[in-house]
Image: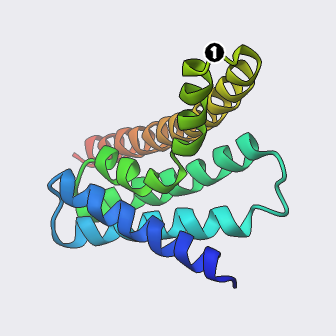
Amino acid sequence: MTYAEIIKIIAGLSGSLCFGILFNMHGKKLYASAFGGLMASVLSLIMETPVADEPVRYFMISAIISLYSEIIARILKTPATPVITTSLIPLIPGGSLYYTMSYAFESDFNMFVGKASSTLKLASALALGIILVTTVFRVVTANQCVQRKSIQHNKS
């Protein structure tokens, strides 16, 4: 593991931790969110070589982190949205967005369009990963709730 990779992991952990504090999270919720950011950073490094397509990699990581966040939110009895949001902070394409805006201000239309397209693909991949997992998780838990109510109704 290189020095740059260690810094990336520490930055992912501390970034998620700080955003958790900013979102007024405390105790186990804060630590779970920070751990999610750590996981996102580690997964990003691990998947960099085997998954060459960056939007696909972002989709996969956001789906994994969203699943982790949904499970942790149920365990800690808290809404999943703040946990997902803070855990995915390390994946936000800030550098890509910065360069997109930089090319726009420099009036370099070709570079702007290319970077904007890349940024939108990454942001869309993150959003799709979250939406897919959250939707499936909610459907499954709703079905379990209906089954429990049906069983209780049949017993009485």
Mark 1 neighbour class, 10 Å CA radius: few under 14, some 14 to 19, many 20 or more: few
- Taking depth in this image into account, of 154 and 104 the one nearest to the observer is 104
| 52 is higher (above) or lower (below) than 59 | below
Q: Nearer the viewer, residue 71 or 59?
A: 59
Which quarter of the rendering shows the C terminus?
Answer: top left
30 w.r.t. 154: above or below = below
Q: Quadrant of the N terminus?
A: bottom right
Q: Is residue 86 in sight in this rendering?
A: yes
Disc 1, SS: loop
Q: Is residue 33 visible?
A: no
| Residue at x-position 69% and y-position 29% | 115
Location of residue 7 in the rendering, given as x and y in whole percent from the top left corner: 53, 75
**Quarter holding residue 128:** top right
Quarter occupied by residue 43: bottom right
Q: Amino acid at mark 1?
A: Ser
Horizontal and vertical percent position of residue 132: 57, 36
Q: Which residue is mark 1?
A: 107
In the displayed structure, does residue 54 sit left or right of residue 154? Answer: right
- Please, which colouring scheme is shown? rainbow
Residue at the (36%, 61%) spot, across then down: 16
How many callouts does the rendering have? 1
25 or 146, nearer to the observer = 25
What percent of the width, then of the height, locates residue 135? 49, 35
The residue shown at (62%, 54%) is 61
- For the point 63% across and 15% down, the residue is 107
